[in-house]
Amino acid sequence: MTTSAFAEAGVRTRPEGLPSLTLFPEIMAWAKKRILQPDGPDAGSPFVLTAEQEHFLLWWYAVNERGRFIYRRGMLRRMKGWGKDPIGAYICIVEQNGPSRFSHFDASRWPRGIPHPAAWVQTAAVSREQTKNTMTLFPGMMSPA
């Protein structure tokens, strides 16, 4: 857990370490072939997450020994320019099309994912105008695959 006034008050700011079981490695392998950098000098190349974004998603897709998600809710709050819109679009694409739901444990007892059978993905913001920031990224982020 990070040290902050919130942590001292008993509010959990983020989990320590890494989860022992998570769907995210499979999701990341899937995404590297399908989710693209939407703009800038690397536009069209595979989308690259920052270390902090990877840490967030490792925990976002963490499961327990029964394959159930450890967390049912989460919040990502960061300053302007951190990359909330691209990571939000990334999560939406994964939830719509990727192996975002637990399927089974493989022979090495690692969790495997499958696409959601009836995905319904919504994104929200304080204003409708703010959702456009995320929504305009989809065409550039989705590869033909």
Image (cartoon, helix red, strand yellow):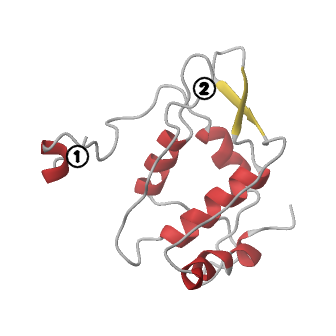
Query: Where is residue 132, by image quadrant?
Result: bottom right
Q: Nearer the viewer, residue 58 or 133?
A: 133
Q: Which mark is residue 68?
A: 2
- Determine the residue located farthest toward the front in the rendered image: 127
Q: Earlier in the sequence, mark 1 or mark 2?
A: 1
Q: Is residue 89 above or below residue 63?
A: below
Q: Where is residue 145, by image quadrant?
A: bottom right
- Asked if disc 1 and disc 2 are in contact, CB closer than 8 Å, the reply is no
Mark 1 lies on residue: 2
Depth check: 131 or 110 in front? 131
Q: On the picture, is 66 further left or further right than 145?
A: left
- Helix, strand or loop at mark 1: loop
> What's the residue at 41%, 34% (across, down)?
18
- Mark nearest the camera among 1 and 2 is 2
Q: Residues within 10 Å of mark 2 (few under 14, many from 20)?
A: few
Q: CA distance from mark 1 to mark 2?
A: 25 Å
Location of residue 33 in the rendering, given as x and y in whole percent from the top left corner = 75, 56
Q: Is residue 106 above or below residue 134?
A: above
Quadrant of res 79: bottom left
Name the foreground residue: 84 vs 143. Answer: 84
Label 2 element class: loop
Residue at 43% across, 54% down: 75
Front position in the image: 54 or 2: 2
Q: Residue drawn 57% across and 64% down?
A: 88
| Image coordinates for residue 23, horizontal then vertical, percent | 62, 35
Residue 51: where, in percent of width, then height?
A: 43, 54
Instruction: Please tell me the numbered disc located at residue 47.
Output: none
Which residue is found at the position 71% from the left and 36% from the top? 101
